[in-house]
Image (tube, helix red, strand yellow):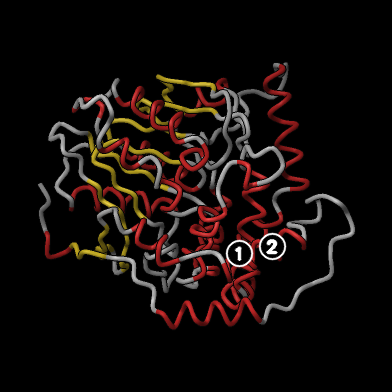
Amino acid sequence: MMKAMSEIRPYRIDVPTAVLDDLDERLARTRWPEAETVDDWSQGIPLAYTRELAGYWANGYDWRAREAALNRFDQFVTEIDGLDLHFIHQRSPHDGALPLVITHGWPGSVVEFHKVIEPLVNPPSGRAEDAFHVICPSLPGYGFSGRPTHTGWGVEKIADAWETLVGRLGYDRYGAQGGDWGAAVTTQIGRNKGRCVGIHLNMPIAKPAGSGDFTEDDQQALAAYAEHRKWGTGYSKQQSTRPQTLGYGLVDSPVGQMAWVIEKFWAWADCDGHPENVLSRDELLDNVMLYWVTGSGASSARLYWESFNSFISDGRVELPTGVAAFPKEILRTPRSWCDAAYNITHWTTMPKGGHFAAFEQPELFVDDVRVFFATVR
């Protein structure tokens, strides 16, 4: 099935011991700020929890065990437009499986998908029509992908790269799925069409459908958006304007990188006030490690510099589009807005879950992906 094998190189995660030793030393030397002056997370991740989580990272977390668990997936690297791109490619035992590209966002990584890959690849039903060949790329500048050395690696170029990757793997048709930046890339894939037969999103990107007579859903969405702009967009303003300046601190301080990421899991996950209510400490730190061991604090932030101001682009997606609308998503976009931007053929209002859909609610995620793509196989 795979062709151009000389262009695709096997990859196995193997973080040098020196990097782990350096992490231990840096954690031990952390210079801590004073505590926040409130009794909640409104000023950011609290000092007591940050120290507790950093202590576990230093003394309880076992990266080698977590690394081995991630290495159960088949991983590869291929060069596209001069940049090495890392990806998981887990083929189904069913020949009739549909290839599916799943794209993460920030502050996520391919770690987000560790609970959904196996049930997608080898469904409990045992039926080929429920199965997928799963492809999970690491975005340029993220995880084990290469870091761009010049401008231009924005959403449009990434969508083109994913199309190239699918062709290089020997597939002539595929589906695409994504949330966050993954939703932006997947939306662009839908506009481009190419080999893609349909897209599924857990964060659809759309503007209000009108300028008056807003429904209750519209008003709630606009109020949530205003609240997010007031209290939740400082990170994106910094990353979209001065990612290099921010990067020095993120790449130098493991606690700084950890705090920058974990605060967003508190804010964006459906976690009832604490990220460990929905994800384990190990899972949270697995994701942080993909930023820390690769030193990708600056390079991951540059995607905001490249594409943030064009996150919502013109051009309707005419491909069949499925949406899983999770109640604690950052931007809960009403269907009426999405109908103008996408050819919505499937919409599910989820009972629970937030921004990190596959990570938080893997069963709901898998079921919805499977139901939607059954309509376009």
**Point 45% across, 56% down: residue:** 154
- Horizontal side of 364 relative to 81 (left or right) equals right
Residue under pointer 1: 56
Label drawn at residue 229: none
**Point 58% across, 51% down: residue:** 309
Few, some or many C-alpha atoms within 10 Å of disc 1 (few <14, some 14-19, many ≥20)? some
Which amino acid, by three-letter code, is at mark 1?
A: Tyr
Label drawn at residue 52: 2
Q: CA distance from mark 1 to mark 2?
A: 6 Å
| Residue 352 pos. (x, y %) | 58, 28
- As drawn, which residue projects farthest toward the right? 37
Dot 2 falls on a residue whose secondary structure is: helix
Residues at discs 1 and 2 in contact (Cβ within 8 Å): yes
Which amino acid, by three-letter code, is at mark 2?
A: Glu
Few, some or many C-alpha atoms within 10 Å of disc 2 (few <14, some 14-19, many ≥20)? few
Q: Taking 153 as reference, is 32 above or below it?
A: below
Q: Taking 265 as reference, is 208 above or below it?
A: above
The C terminus, quarter of image: top left
Dot 1 falls on a residue whose secondary structure is: helix
| Residue 208 pos. (x, y %) | 63, 28
Foreground residue among 38 and 170: 38
| Residue 63 pos. (x, y %) | 45, 66
Q: Taking 126 as reference, is 282 above or below it?
A: below
| Residue 165 pos. (x, y %) | 25, 53
Foreground residue among 338 and 203: 203
- Horizontal side of 295 relative to 200 (left or right) equals right
**Point 60% across, 80% down: residue:** 26
The number of numbered badges drawn on the structure is 2
**Point 50% across, 63% down: residue:** 300
Foreground residue among 221 and 44: 44
